[in-house]
Amino acid sequence: MVPVRGKEGIVLRCGKCGYEVRPKGKASLVLRKRVRHSVRDRIIVIEGEQPRVLPKTKALCPKCGNNEAFYWMVQTRAGDEPPTRFFKCTKCGFVWREYD
């Protein structure tokens, strides 16, 4: 129900069917406002190039066979499950993941 000005004052109107009802006193009328965030306020997730300061480990690249890769961990599932490990080959840049 959305408050709108009717012929006899403010009424609550259903957005689907158009049903109208007068509110019973001011205490029963609650206004809600939809908050719209600007692009600047939103959370930014960077999936592009990872910084070169990532740690290295021995891991076999499934694409080129190189045995060294950068790695990082991200909590992609529920908090009670282990994080997902991501690897990026130091030679060809191929990215793969490993689940526990």
Image (cartoon, rainbow, N blue to C red):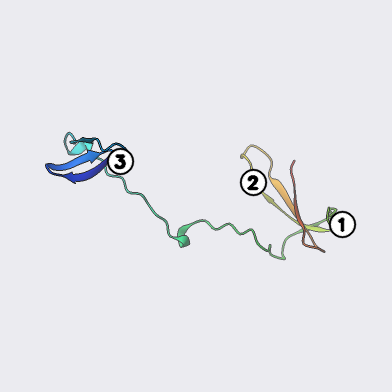
Q: Give whichever of discs 1 and 2 has the lower sequence position.
A: 1
Q: Which residue is painted at 77% across and 62% down in the image?
A: 93
**Left or right: 47 in relation to 87:** left
For label 2, the SS is loop
Q: How crowded is mark 1: few (under 14 residues within 10 Å), some or many (20 or more)?
A: some
Q: Give whichever of discs 3 and 2 has the lower sequence position.
A: 3
Q: Which residue is painted at 16% across and 36% down in the image?
A: 25
Mark 1 in CB contact with mark 2 (< 8 angstroms): no
Report, in whole angstroms, how far the alpha carbon at label 3 lies from the one at label 1: 61 Å
Q: Nearer the viewer, mark 3 or mark 1?
A: 3
The image quadrant where one finds the N terminus is top left
| Residue 83 position within the rendered picture, expressed as x and y whole percent measured from the top left | 68, 44
| Residue 60 position within the rendered picture, expressed as x and y whole percent measured from the top left | 85, 53
For label 3, the SS is loop
**Residue 15's disc number:** 3
Q: Give whichever of discs 3 and 1 has the lower sequence position.
A: 3
Residue 28 vs residue 9, the one in the foreground: 9
Report, in whole angstroms, how far the alpha carbon at label 1 lies from the one at label 2: 25 Å
Residue 95 vs residue 79, the one in the foreground: 95
Residue pointed to by mark 2: 75
